[in-house]
Image (spheres, helix red, strand yellow):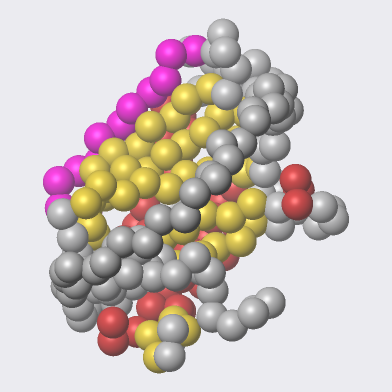
Amino acid sequence: MPVIVGEVVRLVVSGTYQGSTVQFGHHFRAKTSGATLSGLAASYASGAVPLITAAVSAEVTLLSLAVSSTRADGDEGHRAPLPGGTVGTQPGDGLPGQNAMLVSVHTGIRGKRRRGRFYLPGVSESSQVGGRIIAPQLTALTALAEGLQTQFTGAGNANWEMCVYSPPSPPPPPVKVPAVRTDTITTPATDLVADSLIVTQRRRRLGVGA
């Protein structure tokens, strides 16, 4: 079913990586009255999915695409399963799932509401040095960014254009009175446990201000 011209939809790519579910997505705006959710999914599957599989670890399996309107009264979402065997091609052991590749989305206008980003799972251990992605995975990641730009910006797609979507903020919640601790607790330690899972700190990128 066609959508409204100017309507914004969200496309989500779902898959698995090292036994966990992974997702990432983009926003698109309808350029014509002939734009459909199924048409966007088909276009993304044919143009973008091959670039994604080329950029991610062989431990990533892509399962489906889901497109849904951002309008409360929008059309029912469209889900498109991907063919079996839609897996990444980057060789080598993958880094733990909390490590990801970043692609920034720019609009040419200043302000954080005019910028976007998405994170790709499946960093290959052999394609990183000191926390920075190197070739061949960096080459494939760059090709993905350039491919999405070619396909979904400017005149690349007749019906859809990628966009950065920033909806209104919800009203602030009522101010809560914080709990006050009036006592001091000191408890002797009795056990220390080492965890085999690799963890990360809060900062996502290498260095300060990188």
Q: Which residues are magenta?
A: 75-87
Q: Is residue 181 left or right of residue 110?
A: left
Considering the whole magenta stretch, tell me its main secondary structure. Answer: loop
Q: Is residue 176 above or below residue 119?
A: above
Q: Nearer the viewer, residue 51 or 98?
A: 98
Q: Position of residue 112 (x, y in %)?
A: 75, 52
Q: Nearer the viewer, residue 131 or 6?
A: 131
Q: Is residue 191 above or below residue 135?
A: above
Q: Position of residue 206 (x, y in %)?
A: 54, 80
Residue 117 figure quarter? bottom right
Residue 102: say if magenta. no
Residue sitting at x 17%, y 68%? 190
Q: Is residue 84 above or below residue 205?
A: above
Q: Position of residue 77 (x, y in %)?
A: 42, 20
Residue sitting at x 43%, y 52%? 48
Residue 191 figure quarter? bottom left
The quarter of the picture where the C terminus appears is bottom right
Q: Work out whether residue 143 can be spotted.
A: no
Q: Work out whether residue 129 can be spotted.
A: yes
In this view, the residue farthest toward the top is 73
Marks counted in the figure total: 0
Residue sitting at x 55%, y 45%? 182
Residue 77: say if magenta. yes
In this view, the residue farthest toward the right is 110
